[in-house]
């Protein structure tokens, strides 16, 4: 009950805490007597919450930790189900299947789960460096083990230094004081005036507020303080995957910050949302990197000013570092201005592919070929409800994932976007056609390919033409082969796309995509699909489609028309160890997927951006703005009367006859150690 109350009123307590810092000195200096309902209060203790929050000096970092996943076996003892690698239990020689019957000659045999709690408390009380004596039964043989305990809590955690934090002040502005939810409590002034505080909303609650109740009841005030302390300590807690590390490799620093300062949550959340409601995709990718604690060495954003980004000072764009991977001839080509021909702008995009691919290869350069293949084949299984991944494979996925250099993926994405923006973000499609009337005449010629992209062992032309005729039909202007996939350009008529490609540019028409447009893979590290107009249908029968970055960068951009996106798992602006983007500029669009789609990030960033129209979003689970481990996912729809649905397939265990799990629409999701000791922190979803 207390937790329910705490979560519902945390925003209001933020109000009380901040006001106390501004008013206590004034009240004390003027010796003003403060009362509520004829009850006098000492001004120094009027709020009684000024010291509430996490206190590191009150934390016992020397609590003992054994490192086992356990289960009570009634009448026998405590069953060791799993052991964390490198933990005290593992070093002492305990094994899964052992049954602990005594600790320091005290019986561990009990009738219920309280038995586990007592065992845990005993281990914690022994403390770091302590050596409990464990009596264990293994194969009907009694053994004794003496593990040397680690500390349960980590000594250090990482907190962010980011514009999102600097934007969040600890003082209320005039706007704060005059906007909900403070108005519901009769205004901020009433909280310090001594007047009775009554809600002005349509709530059914009557009588005293919870704030007033907590002020006058020491018991609940102390309980709230204990709750805040417990939340803060959780930021330092070891996860099941960890052994004796100083920091948590998967916990985002922004999450650590909020666990230590939960009353800052509303304003920081608003700062994040404000940033991502802008129009600048480059700034959004950059901010996502910051939220994921990823620090790219070179950001190649060289576009129009980013007025809505906190990373821009005074409305000026940030200085740009040139990528060391760009060759002189490509750099010369990239100097073309946005007013040049569409052919020239598209050539800039093609020229950027080589350095992007080089950066992506660097991102996975620390992995062996066997590790890369293992990660590629198993990482997605963690989040699929119909697929089971074994604990040892899950542990290995998490271990290998730490070798991936996400910063390189963000560097590659910023470079690519800097070349896409003149074509895709700087103007509406009608303006584009006015500037480039040749698009209507389909005067797009095959592109110049750098030596990096040229196919050395290309098939004979006749075989290529036959193959391309099967894979790309209708109004297809030309197909070019490269060593990272094909480049396909469709005309203004109806085109049909059946095979995957590195680049698809369609100039118009009502088109059909039966492939995985704008979706990368290990064979196609960068995949771009740009459709300029038409009522298009994107229909994927398998996973990883429609703007998904799977071990690379996937971008799908559709600028006009009422489009339909039909897909399965990990699609529609999703990522697995990459960056995935689906951007639809206008039209009444329909999205339907299964699991992990419509703005989902796992070890990277997945974005679905909609700029207009009355849109419909359907999914079953993990969809519509979900951040998995080390991931950021967002669904941003800026206009229209839209419909969102998630659920309907996977029953909720709490009430399986009436409700379903969705875990969607703004969700940060980690790996819970429920059936296995292996777990990892979650990400950010909006």
Image (spheres, grey):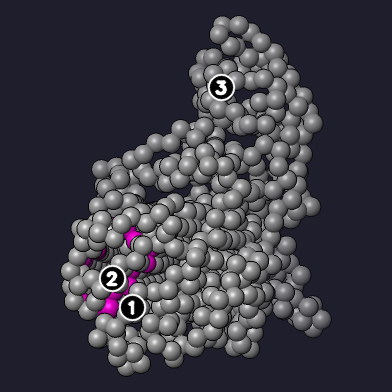
User: Which of 644/597 is in front?
Assistant: 597
Q: Residue furthest top?
A: 141
Q: Is residue 194 above or below residue 517?
A: below
Q: Residues within 10 Å of mark 1 (few under 14, many from 20)?
A: few
- Tell me which segment is drawn in magenta: 496-514
Q: Are marks 1 and 2 in contact (CB under 8 Å)?
A: yes
- Residue 469 among those drawn in magenta: no
Residue 581 in the image, given as x and y percentages of width and height? 41, 66
Q: Is residue 335 above or below residue 82?
A: below
Q: Secondary structure at mark 3?
A: loop
- Does the image show residue 84? yes
Q: Which residue is mark 1?
A: 445
Q: Which residue is mark 2?
A: 478
Q: Which residue is mark 3?
A: 96
Residue 582 in the image, given as x and y percentages of width and height? 37, 68
Q: Is residue 320 above or below residue 661?
A: below
Q: Secondary structure at mark 2?
A: strand
Q: Decide if residue 668 is on the left or right side of residue 591.
A: right
Q: Earlier in the sequence, mark 1 or mark 2?
A: 1
Mark 3 against mark 1, which lies toward the viewer?
Answer: 1
């Amino acid at each position: 009950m207390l937790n329910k109350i705490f979560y519902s009123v945390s925003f209001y307590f933020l109000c009380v805490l901040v006001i106390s810092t501004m008013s206590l000195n004034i009240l004390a200096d003027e010796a003003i007597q403060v009362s509520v309902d004829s009850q006098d209060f000492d001004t120094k203790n009027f709020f009684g919450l000024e010291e509430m929050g996490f206190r590191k000096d009150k934390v016992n970092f020397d609590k003992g930790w054994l490192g086992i996943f356990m289960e009570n076996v009634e009448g026998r003892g405590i069953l060791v189900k799993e052991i964390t690698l490198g933990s005290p239990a593992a070093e002492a020689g305990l094994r899964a299947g052992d049954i602990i019957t005594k600790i320091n000659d005290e019986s561990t045999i009990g009738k219920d789960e309280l038995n586990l709690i007592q065992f845990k408390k005993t281990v914690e009380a022994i403390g770091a460096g302590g050596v409990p004596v464990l009596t264990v039964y293994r194969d009907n043989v009694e053994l004794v083990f003496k593990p040397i305990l680690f500390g349960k809590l980590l000594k250090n955690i990482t907190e962010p230094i980011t514009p999102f934090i600097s934007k969040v002040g600890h003082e209320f502005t005039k706007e704060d004081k005059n906007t909900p939810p403070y108005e519901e409590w009769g205004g901020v002034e009433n909280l310090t005036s001594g007047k009775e505080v009554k809600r002005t909303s349509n709530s059914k609650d009557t009588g005293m507020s919870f704030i007033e109740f907590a002020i006058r009841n020491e018991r609940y005030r102390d309980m709230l303080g204990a709750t805040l302390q417990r939340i803060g300590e959780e930021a330092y807690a070891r996860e099941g995957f960890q052994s004796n590390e100083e920091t948590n490799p998967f916990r985002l620093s922004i999450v650590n910050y909020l666990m230590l300062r939960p009353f800052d949550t509303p304003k920081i959340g608003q700062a994040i949302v404000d940033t991502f409601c802008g129009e600048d995709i480059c700034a959004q990718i950059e901010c996502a990197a910051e939220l994921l604690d990823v620090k790219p060495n070179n950001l190649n954003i060289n576009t129009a000013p980013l007025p809505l980004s906190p990373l821009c000072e005074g409305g000026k764009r940030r200085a740009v570092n040139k990528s060391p991977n760009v060759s002189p001839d490509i750099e010369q080509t990239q100097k073309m201005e946005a007013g040049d021909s569409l052919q020239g702008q598209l050539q800039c995009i093609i020229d950027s592919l080589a350095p992007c691919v080089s950066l992506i290869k660097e991102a996975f350069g620390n992995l062996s070929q066997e590790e890369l293949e293992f990660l590629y084949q198993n990482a997605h299984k963690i989040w699929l409800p119909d697929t089971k991944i074994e604990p040892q494979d899950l542990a290995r996925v998490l271990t290998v994932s730490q070798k991936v250099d996400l910063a390189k993926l963000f560097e590659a994405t910023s470079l690519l976007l800097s070349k896409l923006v003149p074509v895709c973000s700087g103007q509406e499609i009608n303006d584009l056609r006015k500037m480039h009337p040749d698009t209507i005449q389909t005067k797009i010629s095959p592109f110049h390919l750098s030596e990096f992209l040229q196919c050395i062992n290309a098939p004979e032309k006749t075989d290529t033409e036959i193959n391309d005729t099967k894979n790309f039909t209708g109004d297809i202007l030309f197909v070019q082969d490269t060593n990272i996939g094909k480049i396909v350009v469709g005309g203004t008529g109806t085109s049909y796309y059946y095979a995957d490609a590195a680049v698809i540019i369609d100039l118009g028409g009502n088109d059909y995509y039966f492939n995985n447009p704008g979706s990368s893979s290990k064979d196609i590290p960068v995949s771009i699909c740009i459709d300029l107009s038409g009522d298009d249908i994107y229909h994927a029968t398998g996973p990883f489609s429609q703007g998904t970055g799977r071990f690379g960068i996937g971008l799908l951009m559709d600028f006009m028309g009422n489009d339909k996106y039909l897909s399965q798992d990990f699609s529609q602006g999703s990522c697995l160890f990459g960056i995935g983007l689906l951007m639809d500029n206008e039209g009444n669009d329909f999205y339907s997927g299964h699991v992990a789609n419509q703005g989902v990030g796992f070890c990277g960033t997945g974005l679905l951006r909609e700029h207009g129209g009355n849109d419909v979003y359907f999914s079953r689970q993990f969809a519509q703005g979900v951040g998995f481990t080390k991931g950021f996912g967002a669904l941003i729809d800026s206009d229209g009367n839209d419909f969102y649905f998630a659920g309907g397939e996977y029953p909720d265990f709490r009430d399986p006859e009436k409700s379903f799990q969705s875990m969607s629409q703004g969700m940060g999701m980690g790996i819970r150690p429920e059936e296995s000791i292996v777990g990892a922190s979650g990400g950010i979803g909006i």
